[in-house]
């Protein structure tokens, strides 16, 4: 409860000045591990849901449910929503790309692509963030190691496009193209978080973002009205897990941890999340893992590692972090 109150309030100015030079407290370590465990398993929960419920309807209902819960929590705790236009606009745009367009792509793609492979595509976020930060974050420049990581990441994503073999389903190939582009939008959202959303309670900021994402998802969901759906107990459990843990806890926890940990430490969550998603997909859902998938994933992992090493060596202003934003 104490840790939750600290998350709701946001970091103090003294903590913001000194948190990157100390060993993280146990609450931060516990939060880090919890985030990895939650977001490594949400991909399988999405797969279970879209097998019985139209993907855009499932994504929209998740976004609305998260928005309602987060708004209720903010009101119950007396947390004030941001009022200045700059903060509201940044939170809305971050929600549009992190929740709206990204969830539309992820939920639709998981009809045709293994959940573990979708997670590997998502792990490319930090690579594009390092590239955009060169232009939009003061003091965060592209080093030769970051450029090498960017090249490896692009090659790895190129290997993953079309994997597994789409066969007679052209939707699978289109899905991999959309998934390859999706992390670029996550990087845009992360830049906004770093530049504008670094202060204040994260709960109202997340609520603003998920409401904005819901608006984007609405027309997609309306296009699927009338399609058959089945809300079995298993689907209901997956939905509740995605809403309460994957989003209400996960999105707030991610923003809270980003303010307290080194970017390199946060970047490494991508390796753990994607690896866990691949294992869960193979063991729990029976998804196949091909050598092409493993090869592309290895190149993306190397790219993330290069980016993390480059960030650790940098003495300039900390680079931003892009994680699987509300997958």
Image: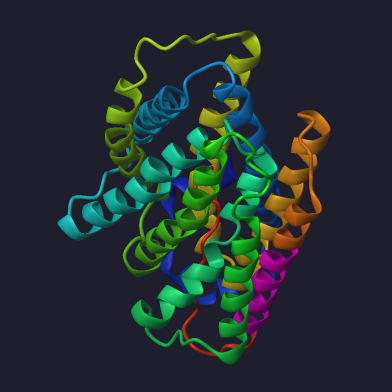
Position above or below: 69 against 304? above
When asked about the image quadrant of residue 245, the answer is top right
Look at the picture and state if 266 lies above or below 46: below
For the stretch drawn in magenta, what is the main secondary structure?
helix
- Observer-nearest residue: 175 or 40? 175
Quarter of the image containing the N terminus? Answer: top right
Task: Name the residue: 46% across, 83% down.
Answer: 317
Front residue of 49 and 289: 289
Viewer-closest of 292 and 35: 292
Q: Which of the two residues, 1 or 187, is positioned nearer the viewer here?
A: 187
Q: Is residue 113 magenta?
A: no
The residue at the point 58 percent across, 31 percent down is 46
**87 lies left or right of 250:** left
Whether residue 204 is visible here, answered yes or no, is no
* x and y, in percent, of residue 3 in the image: 58, 46
Q: Position of residue 45 (x, y in %)?
A: 63, 29
Query: In the image, which residues are magenta?
Result: 298-312
Q: Position of residue 186 (x, y in %)?
A: 44, 57
Percent position of residue 299, x then y: 71, 68
Count of numbered marks: 0
Taking the image as shown, residue 194 lies to the left or right of residue 6, namely: left
At 49% from the left and 45% from the top, the residue drawn is: 174
Residue in view at x 62 percent, y 86 percent = 145
């Amino acid at each position: 409860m104490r840790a939750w109150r600290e998350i709701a309030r946001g970091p103090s100015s003294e903590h913001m000045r000194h948190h990157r030079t100390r060993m993280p407290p146990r609450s931060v370590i516990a939060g880090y591990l919890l985030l990895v465990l939650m977001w490594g398993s949400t991909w399988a929960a999405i797969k279970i849901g879209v097998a019985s419920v139209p993907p855009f309807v499932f994504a929209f209902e998740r976004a609305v449910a998260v928005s309602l819960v987060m708004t209720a929590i903010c009101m119950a705790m007396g947390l004030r929503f941001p009022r200045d236009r700059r903060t509201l606009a940044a939170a809305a745009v971050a929600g549009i790309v992190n929740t709206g367009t990204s969830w539309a792509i992820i939920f639709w793609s998981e009809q045709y692509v293994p959940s573990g492979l979708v997670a590997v595509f998502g792990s490319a976020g930090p690579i594009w963030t390092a590239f955009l930060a060169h232009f939009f974050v003061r003091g965060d420049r592209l080093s030769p190691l970051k450029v090498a990581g960017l090249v490896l990441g692009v090659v790895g994503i190129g290997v993953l496009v079309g994997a597994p073999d789409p066969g007679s389903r052209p939707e699978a190939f289109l899905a991999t193209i959309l998934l390859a582009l999706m992390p670029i939008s996550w990087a845009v959202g992360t830049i906004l978080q770093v530049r504008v959303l670094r202060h204040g309670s994260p709960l109202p900021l997340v609520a603003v973002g998920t409401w904005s994402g819901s608006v984007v998802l609405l027309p997609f969901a309306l296009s699927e009205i009338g399609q058959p759906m089945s809300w079995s107990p298993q689907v209901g459990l997956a939905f509740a897990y995605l809403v309460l843990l994957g989003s209400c806890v996960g999105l707030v926890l991610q923003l809270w941890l980003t303010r307290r940990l080194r970017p390199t430490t946060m970047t490494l969550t991508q390796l753990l999340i994607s690896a866990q998603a691949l294992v869960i997909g193979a063991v729990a859902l029976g998804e196949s893992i091909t050598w092409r998938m493993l090869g592309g994933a290895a190149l993306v992992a190397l790219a993330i590692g290069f980016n993390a090493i480059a960030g650790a060596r940098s003495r300039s202003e900390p680079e931003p972090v892009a994680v699987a934003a509300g997958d």
